[in-house]
Image (spheres, rainbow, N blue to C red):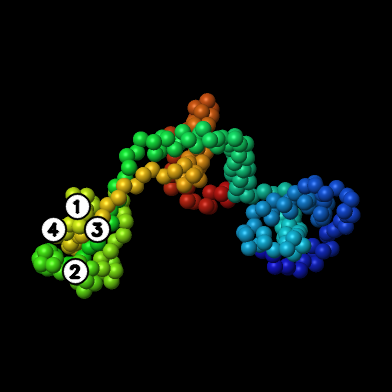
Amino acid sequence: MLKRTSFLATVAATTLLALPLSAESGADQVIATVNGTDITMGHMIVVRSSLPDQYRDLPDEVLFKGILDQVIQQTVLAEQEGDNIPNRVRLALENEKRAMMAAEHMDKMLAGAVTEEAVKAVYDETYGGAAPEKEFDASHILVETEEEAKALVSELEGGADFAELAKVKSTGPSGPRGGALGWFGTGQMVPAFENAVKDMEAGAISAPVQTQFGWHVIKLNETRTKDAPKVEDVREELEQQVRMNVVDAYIEKLTAAATVSRTAMDKIDTSNLKDLTLLEK
């Protein structure tokens, strides 16, 4: 983007204004004129604000020159179309204006929306009535057949070490770790595995359990109760939820009050949605 391209016509048609520091220095400050079209500091600021981080981190003087070169070149090129604005460009500009104005209004509307009271209300709604969640620390040995799994149960009942058997016999990725799966909660394991663990006591060995991965012999090492998180631990997600709630309610209110008419779907050829040639008509 910042690579300089030499345009003799650009240089010839451009007047750079070497304004003293005491001159106007706001967004309306004219930085250059191209065939009578002003390029202002405001134009430059908007371009910079949309750049990727790796460009925005460049020194100001380097970035300034690169942005100015780009805007000058774009201005010269755009002039060649005169007042003829292609349909696809007009539609894109309308979409962009609509999106930017909507975002501008939402920013204003959301100012002050995130209060401690609102955050606490969302926290209470999300976590207030939730029962403490039970978590499990388990290990397993995964094999291909039920017969292999039953043989493992027999060995374990005879006093074999679970971790050592897992290292030798398990086909699962946890085998080298002695079958250790670590802590997990509801919904993190496939249903058959989870249901088996929920019915076990700490230290117990399960009967063979079949899942889509094969046959498991499970050892429940221990359980614990996970309490609801503290507000500060989930503040970011709570604040985001507050914003979403405010936005949803506000948009629903505005939409309900607006006069909206829709063309019946049976009158629309939805396949036109991907037909870019329609923009040329």
Measure the alpha-carbon separation of dots 3 and 4: 15 Å
Q: Is residue 94 visible?
A: no
Give the quarter of the figure containing the N terminus. Answer: bottom right
Residue at screen point 82% across, 64% down: 11
For disc 3, the marked residue is 221
- Mark in front: 1 vs 4: 1
Q: CA distance from mark 1 to mark 2?
A: 18 Å
Q: Amino acid at mark 2?
A: Asp
- Does any portion of residue 168 appear in the rendered image? yes
- If you read the primary sequence from the N terminus, does the residue marked by circle 1 or circle 4 appear first? 1
Which element type, helix, strand or loop, lies under badge 2?
loop
Q: Which residue is mark 4?
A: 207
| Residue 126 quadrant | top left
What separation in Å lies between label 2 and label 3 (alpha carbons)?
Answer: 13 Å
Farthest top residue in view: 257
Comes first in the chain, label 4 or label 2 = 2
Kindly identify which residue carries mark 1. Answer: 201
Give the residue type that dot 3 points to: Asn
Instruction: State the residue in front, 277 or 134.
Output: 134
Residue at label 2? 161
Q: What type is the residue that disc 4 sits on?
A: Ala
